[in-house]
Structure formats: C-alpha cells, structure tokens
Image (spheres, rainbow, N blue to C red):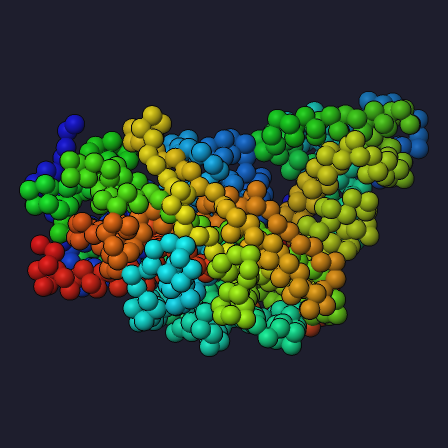
Amino acid sequence: MNTETKNSLGMNRRDAIKRAGFALGAAISASTLSGVAFAQSSRSGASWKPVNLKRRQVEVAGAIAERILPKTDTPGALDVGVPEFMDILYGSYMTKEERSIFAKGLNAMNQRARKAHKKHFAELNAAQQDDLLRDLAADSKNREFYEKVRELTLVGYFTSKEVGMHVLKYDPIPGMYKGCIPRSEVGDTAWSYS
Amino acid sequence: MNIQGKGTKQNTYDAIVIGSGISGGWAAKELSEKGLKTLVLERGRDVKHGEYPTAHMEPWEFEGRNKISQGKLARQQKQNRTGYTTSPASAHWFVDDVDNPYSEDQPFDWMRGYHVGGRSLLWGRQSYRFSDLDFEANAKDGMSIDWPIRYKDIAPWYDYAEKFAGISGQNEGLPQLPDGSFLPPMAMNCVEEHVRKRITENFSDRIMTIGRAANLTQPHNGRGNCQYRNRCIRGCPYGAYFSSNAATLPAGYASGNLTLRPFSIVNQIIYDKNKDKAVGVRIIDAETNEVIEYYSKIIFSCASAIASTFILMNSKSDRFPNGFGNDSGELGHNLMDHHFKVGASGRIDGYDDKYYKGRRPNGIYVPRFRNIDKASAQKDYVRGFGYQGRASREEWSRGVAELARFGKDLKADLIEPGPWRFGIGSWGECLPYHDNKMYLDDKVRDKWGQPTVTFDCGWKENEYSMRKDMKQSAVDILEASGAKDITPFDTPEKSAPGNCIHEMGTARMGRDPKSSVLNKWNQVHSSPNVFVTDGACMTSAACVNPSLTYMALTARAANHAVEELKKGNLS
C-alpha cells in the first residue's frame, strides 16, 4: 500500500492530516474543509471515490472508524482502508434493512455534529468526535447502527493485509501445533486470524 | 424420452456406485481394488485432489473478507443456515438452493455438496466408533427396531477404515467409546490440560480426551501431515485430512478399474421384472439433460441419506409402487440428525503468560457419561450425548461487543491475545421416530424436472429433556474447572434437524423385511444386488459423529458383495 499518494492539492496523506488539524482551528471555507476531510477518509487520498456510499457518509464512517481504532505507533483504521471496506460491504453485502440503518446512522451522526458544533462530523476535532461517539454508544435507539459500524471497523481493520501481516503475528503455515508455550515466544501481539 | 445406451456393452460395468462422498469413495476404492469394473456416478462437477481454489487465500484476498454478498446469498439461503458454510472460503462447496429446491413442513437444514468428493471435502473430521451401547440401544429401551449387527461385526472394519484413512487420537479404554487404530494424538493446550485434570479430580463418571480426527499427525499412505492452518473446509493441498479426493478415489484410479462420470444425476434404479431385480440406473446429464442408462451386476447407493432415499422413492414400478425396496413402508421414515448448539463457556484465569503455536483443526472430547449403566441412568430421557470443545485465547472480535470502549487503549488491547476461554457444546442422540420423515413432492420440480424432497421432522420430548442436562452438565464441568463468567447457551432454534449435517435413517437396516429396508449387509431386502451404505442405512444415531461408521459399513458391504458375486448369489 502506498500511503504517500499525492492528493489533488499536492499534499501527501500525512500532510493532509496535519493540515486538517491545523485547518480545523482556522477559519477556512466549508468546501475546502470537506475536501480535506475526504482525503482523510481514504488510504489512497482524494483519488479514491466511494462507489456506493455518498461522499459525506464515507467521511463520517471513516472518522468514526478512526476514533474507534486510531493511528498510534500502529496503523489506524484510515491507514488500512476501512472506509473502502465499508463502501464495498454497503454496496453488495448488506441487506436492504442493514443498508438503511447504516446510511441513516451516518447521516444522523452528521446531524448531531451540526447541531452541537455547526460542522460536519469529519470536521470536528478528536475530542468533539469522541464526545459524540460516547453519546451514540449510550443511546439505545441507535444501537444497531453503532454495533454495525463497530463490527465493520474491527473486521475491516483486523482482516486487512497490513494488520494481518505486519501488526498481528503472521504464520500462514505453522507446520506444527504446540499447545503450551510461553507467550514471550510469540511476542507482544496475538496470532493473525484463525 | 430418448434414452441413450440401452443394452450397449459400453454402458455396462460390474458395479455402479452412486455418489463420490465419504461412502461412495470407499465403495469405489473397495470394489475397484477387488477387480470389479466400477463406474462412479457423481451428480456434480469433477474436483481433482488439489483443485481447491481458496486453499491459500488470505482473509484480505476476499472482496468482502468473511462476508457473503447479497447476490450470492440469494442463491444459498438455505445453505447459509449453519452460519459458516457459505463464507466465501467455502461457499463453492455448497449447492445452489435455487437450482436444487426442497420444501419443509417443519424446518430442516439440508446442506449439500454436489461435486466429486461431496461432503468428504468439507466434513468436520471427528471420527468415533459406535459401541454396543449404541447397537443394542433400540432393543434395550424399546424405542425402535433392533440393529441387525453388533460391535463385533463392524469392529474389524473400523480397524480397516481407520488404518487407511488415518485417524489421530488417544485410546482411553472406555466401553462406550471403543479404542481404535490411531495415529499419534494432537496435543491439548495449557488450559485444556487444566480442565482435563479438574474433570478427572471432580467427576468419577467422565473424562476428557483429545478429539479423534481424520487429520494426519504424521505422513500416511502417501499423504502429507497436517500443517495446522485450520483451513480444512477449503480442501487440503497436503491431503492431510481424509477426503475421497485425496484418499479413496486415487486408490480406486490406481486399480485401473475405476471410471468416474461427473454431472451424472441418478434419477432412478432400473428394475427388470423378468429378472426380478435391479439391472442398472437411469441418469440425467446435468449439463445436457440427456437421459442415459448404465447397467451393472451390483449397485451401491452412496448418494447421502436423503439423496439415496430420494432415488429409491423415485424408482417406482409395478413391483415397487411405493419406491424401490419399500415393501415395509419404512422408506423415508425414521429420519435422524444430532441435536446440538447447547453447552457453556467460561473464562479461565491464571494462564496469561501462556499461548500456543499453530491452528489445531480439532478440539477436545468428553465421551458420553449418561445412561451407560444403572448408576448413570437418567429418569427424564434415554440415550446420551458427548461434548466437543476447546480452549483458546480470545481474538480481536471480542472488541465488537465492548460497546463503551473505543480509542487507542481498545486498539492496543485487541492487538494482544485476549483472555483464555474454554467452551463445550454437546452432540446429542436423536431417537428414530417413525413420523420424522421425508417424502417426494411432484409439484415442486428441480432444474432438471425431477420431483423434490419435502421434510417433516422435528425434535421431541426426549431431545428437549436431554438438552436441559446437556446445558447443566456443561455448567457443572466449567464450575469444577474454576471457570469465571460462565455463559450457558441453548439455541434449539439454530439447531433444526439437518443443521448438524448428520442426516441418518430413511432406509434403515434391520432383521425383518417388514420393518426395515436393508439387511445386515446393507442390501435391499427385496433386491440384494442393491446396497445402500450411506447415512440412510442407520437404525439409530448414537451421539457420535457418524462418518467413520459409514466408512466401515461400506467397506464391509463391498467385501460381502464381492464374496457373494464369487459365489454366484447375486447374478
């Protein structure tokens, strides 16, 4: 995966994220911001366009996923293409009912953001996003959406190639079974998939 | 109808085998190795050993990862009912429900694999012997007719089947779970060893052993040993678990006597009234719809329980107006499966610094301990159950349900191995009830214009009473093991008959032609050159996985067939 793909503003991804953080504190136009937010929602920068979800929706989905599994010393949800995965699942893998719950849930997150901060969810800073996510988690009315977006975030992240091969301990052909070894022999992480 | 092949020498063999799954593969091997020109008719496509398209695919190489698309799901609504079969890694081994419809008076989950190898490619591989506790059960509790055989009749054939197939396991010296000819057992992990010791310390009536699995722990008969990838259901490139494709069919081909014809849907057995016996079968070519007849001295129906009985039921004549060999009226009745999806799991603390290497395609087993003798007799139900389970460290998926947590701590936690959990689920015996049945529906037709099957089968009081004990005894074992956060489960709604994929009965063996379809050698009472050796023949279900018993019964029947042919008794 090439995380350094240039977007249409000539920024690479990392710059775009830095810039977004800076821009959030500055008074710049909403349309510019939305372009930056969109770049954040994709591992391949602005060159990637959602096929099934609306652009606004995929921005929210990506922002939620990144708050659930943020970038630290290991990749975050955006780094490994979770929004792309959600877009594929929304297009061909969800039932009509799941699609409706998912799309409405994403739209509602944006409405919450606008109500609280007069901004799109993806344009909020991390603390503001976390507050709204906590509200969502505590709200039983939106439980189905919250569970779905969590599930897709975790599945999309932990079954990605980057995480499966380079974050978790990858051992495609173990060749043997040892039932009881010191955990230190494996290292700090869990085995990749089972 | 333009019937091809009538009377042609080219379409005549010594033996015809219907189906190429566990039973058909064994029939093909045994008959061809004993010198019979053998034709195997398989209704689906050919799959040569190694032709397993997803065997090496990683999770990220599937577009929807572990999900099935709505487009594919629309054609596999019923095949999807197990919750695992239609994952993109294995969906191609299960039938298209639109082309292959069936109907349900009561829910019945009929999982089918229409391809060479059948369900031998995707079976669970647990391999246990029936004991005399099982063969005598119907006679002793009077719930149904007696088996016409006892353990001593089948024991040498269990040895024979195990030695060829390669079953890893541990002998335990239990009368209710006979020992076998095993390859070295797989290891238990730390927590399983912990539970095993606690069971032995706390219970006098039960033990825990490693699962007996048709997975090779060392190279065997030219097949490679298990690589511990736990991707068996996709087909094993190493041939490290028993399948027709990797084991019996290659042996059959090596004899030079085996011909296999894929895309051959056997529509009926041909009865010749002048000879008063079956003389061959009529097939529909699945691709061209051509109808072709094949002839042979003997026929082995190994199409799977439901499909073999379908063929018999669909083979009507003046002599057999209610289906071939159905003088007793029992054809289609006494349908069984194991009932399961009941048990418990719990967290085991104290092993956080321990882990395992490899993904073992096998679990642990707690053999039956109820209704074995006076001391273990139950007042609420007859027969019994065993537990299958495992201990493992929880994976990242544990994070989905932790709704209140998100952020960097959650991510760091999920990247590490989770707590150890030990879980067991029970596989329970279902009684052979006459009114649990399948029948043919002439109105609903499949893609080839054939009638279809309707199921009318359900669990009854004995199964539901047993389930209470299955759940409580699982909790007892977990409590004795010091487990925390014990979570019992019992989901009969997810375990309709068929869901365990152990369909049995519908053409049962018995001594009396008035109450059974097959004799003690799996021959149709009224047409002894027709043998049925798949799950249809079962007179009772026991509580253990049945495939090893089909292997042994098939090899035994094939041996008998050849002996009888030599004596001139089948011509």
- The answer to whether A36 appears left or right of B309 in the picture is right
Which part of the image, by quadrant, shows the C terminus of chain B? bottom left
Query: Which image quadrant is residue A91 in?
Result: top right
Question: B131 above or below A119?
Answer: below
Q: Where is residue B426 in the image (x, y as percent from the top left)?
A: 55, 57
- The answer to whether A174 appears left or right of B234 in the picture is right
Question: B297 above or below B169?
Answer: above
Residue at (78, 44) in percent of width and height: B403
- The answer to whether A101 appears left or right of B542 in the picture is right
Question: B52 above or below B446?
Answer: below
Residue at (62, 56) in percent of width and height: B471
Q: Position of residue A147 (x, y in %)?
A: 73, 39
Query: Which image quadrant is residue B135 in?
Result: bottom left
Of residues A89 and A100, the one drawn nearer to the viewer in this rendering: A100
Residue at (51, 43) in percent of width and height: B496
- The answer to whether B480 appears left or right of B433 in the picture is right
The reply to whether residue A130 is in sight is yes
Residue at (74, 54) in percent of width and height: B414
